[in-house]
Image (cartoon, rainbow, N blue to C red):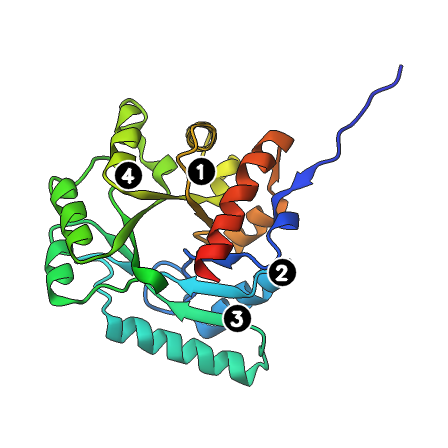
Amino acid sequence: MFQIFSKKIFLIDYLNKFVDIHNHILPGIDDGAKTPDDSIALIRGFSEFGVTRFIATPHIMHNYYPNTPGTINGALETLQNELLTKDFKNISLAASAEHMIDDNFEHLLGEGEVMPMRNDYLLVEMSYLQPPLNFDAAIIKTASKRFYPILAHPERYNFLYHKPKKYGLYKEQGILFQLNLLSLGDFYGSEVPKMALKLLEEGHIDFAASDVHNLDQLNALKELTISKKTLRQMLPVIHATIETFY
């Protein structure tokens, strides 16, 4: 009896020249890399499969990670200097932030203390358990400041699983969606990939990123395999991310 095995499709084989717009590789300022050596190890690991352009996005989260443009740019300078000493000449590294929509977010917007990406995209997140009471007002204010809101990992918000119509309403508000690459596998559990694939199927995903915090997550990304169908759906997202942020 003959058995036909299909070749595994490793996602990283399609990430050459990818721009990682959401990660936690800056050292010592949130729950990501702790030291410059940790950061270098992550960057070296990414470069092994052709990812050399990064927009680092440490958390800005009131009372937990109260980062500012000053702390973020300080960590960026530290890492850039470390890259020079290690002779990493082909690495492109910029800094933005992952902004928690909390009771301090609108204040930061008003004071100009947010950290947008190039072309005025602003990465935002919220609690996994419940939406913030000021979510709609925060999105309106974000738009009023001429920023384009990108919602980080929409597939991971548990409270939306029973309110799937909310995703469509968010899109109608002009919110862009950024998928975590690891959400295509079982790294975050069994429910997250179901929602990730549903959002892909519905054409809701605009960009993708690693959201990598540590080497365990990076190694999981290296081992991630996907179906041919998922690859077909992901390639336009990967290309859109490169074209928008390269």
Image point 33% across, 44% down: which residue? 176
| Residue picked out by circle 1 | 188
Q: Earlier in the sequence, mark 1 or mark 3?
A: 3
Check disc 4 and give the amino acid type. Answer: Tyr
Tag 1–tag 3 contact (CB < 8 Å): no
User: Measured from the top left, where is residue 226 in percent x and y?
Assistant: 61, 35
- Residue 164: name its quadrant: top left
* Viewer-side residue, 242 vs 47: 242
Check disc 3 and give the amino acid type. Answer: Ile
Q: Earlier in the sequence, mark 3 or mark 2?
A: 3
Check disc 2 and give the amino acid type. Answer: Gly
| Residue picked out by circle 4 | 128
SS type, badge 1: loop
Specify the label residue 40 is tagged with: 3
Position of the N terminus, as image quadrant, is top right
SS type, badge 2: loop
